[in-house]
Amino acid sequence: MTIAVLGGAGYIGSHTVKQLLAAGEDVVVLDNLITGHRKAVDPRARFYQGDIRDYHFLSQVFSQEKIDGIVHFAAFSIVPESMKDPLKYFDNNTGGMITLLEAMNQFGIKKIVFSSTAATYGEPKQVPIKETDPQVPTNPYGES
């Protein structure tokens, strides 16, 4: 199975890549390197530098590789920054997801693991938070 890890040059993504490779999966990494680091990518994974907001880039990778599933970590995630530049977060986190889903649909990729955030819940009324709890985000990161 070939898994594409979006944001695979970041901390969580690069560790996920290592675990997938250790499990015998074929791994492709897509990252724009805005916050990730090329050196963090395991050399056994195939690396493509580009942005999830770029449909042409995704189409090129998806036509070159037979992707069976996606693990998506390619989001901006700094709350204070999201307050200063909310459009950056909506463009990447929401717009990028829409572009990704359109490309996945075009290429028949049906499986995705999306790394979300507890920030969508805002200030929880109880801990631990349950997935069924109401989502009341308090910042652009959580909203996006």
Image: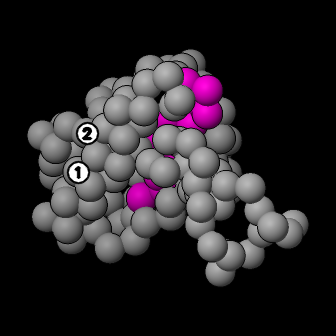
Residue 54 lies, in percent from the top left, at: 20, 37
Q: Secondary structure at mark 2?
A: loop
Q: Could you tell me how far apart the alpha carbons at marks 2 and 1 are, in whole angstroms?
A: 6 Å
Mark 2 or mark 1: which comes first in sequence? 2
How far across and how far down the image is residue 134, in percent?
63, 73
Residue on which disc 2 sits: 53
- Say left or right for 121 vs 111: right
| Picture residue at 49% right of the left edge, 51% below the top | 143
Magenta stretch holds residue 76 = yes
Give the extent of the magenta segment.
70-81
Q: Which residue is mark 1?
A: 99
Label 1: state its secondary structure: helix
Q: Is residue 10 above or below residue 103?
A: above
Q: Residues within 10 Å of mark 2 (few under 14, many from 20)?
A: some
Residue type marked 2: Arg
- Marks 2 and 1: CB-CB under 8 Å? yes
Q: Which mark is residue 32?
A: none
Give the camera-side residue of 114 and 130: 130
